[in-house]
Amino acid sequence: MTESIKKQLTPMFGKPCCRKRVGAVHAGIAFGFGAQVFHNDARLIDSFYGEWEIRNYYRAWRVIQNGRILYGCHDFMAVNELNAAINQIAFGNIISLEKIADFDIRMQLDNDISVDFLATTTDEESLVIFGPNELCVEYSASDGWTASDASIEGSQHRTDSKQN
């Protein structure tokens, strides 16, 4: 991670988790940190985002506590059951993002919980971070860490649509 990206992400560290959501068919997971930012879009599952959002799309992930996998993207549970289970976990405050393998990133929390975002392809991002002022930071196996203005991409990357 470049010094510039580290500097942009520094205000996120120490913020409490305020939202967590598993995507449709276990495809991706999203976490909000910091203040709850409310929107008025009834099409979305949650009524707010976190001031900072960390997520992946259709990529592998796992939640670990004390060296044990609690849940992962391939668990045999209905999505609503997995969301209920994930929402029972007190995720605490984010303290770091670290590369744990050539292609994988770990989000470490202050209570011995971590979330691994696992790359399974080289052509798309395995982790996306949205922050204040339209900040968008991505990690991909092919490009490493990159930062851009999220308003260029549009807001669709930040949404979790309701399921039918």
Image (cartoon, helix red, strand yellow):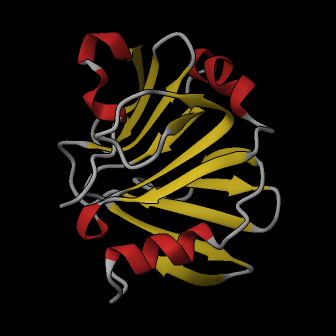
Name the image quarter holding the C terminus: bottom left
Against 20, is 46 above or below?
above
Q: Is residue 85 left or right of residue 40?
A: right
At which x and y percent is residue 19? 58, 49
Closer to us: 3 or 12:
12
At which x and y percent is residue 50? 58, 36
At which x and y percent is residue 117? 45, 57
Judged from this view, the residue extending furthest toward the bottom is 76
Closer to us: 54 or 36:
36
Q: Is residue 37 left or right of residue 138?
A: right
At which x and y percent is residue 58? 25, 56
Closer to us: 140 or 58:
58
Query: Residue 51's quadrant in the figure?
Result: top right
Q: Residue at x 23, y 58 (%)?
A: 163
Q: Residue at x 51, y 74 (%)?
A: 84
Query: Residue 140's quadrant in the figure?
Result: top left
Q: Is residue 16 left or right of residue 141?
A: right
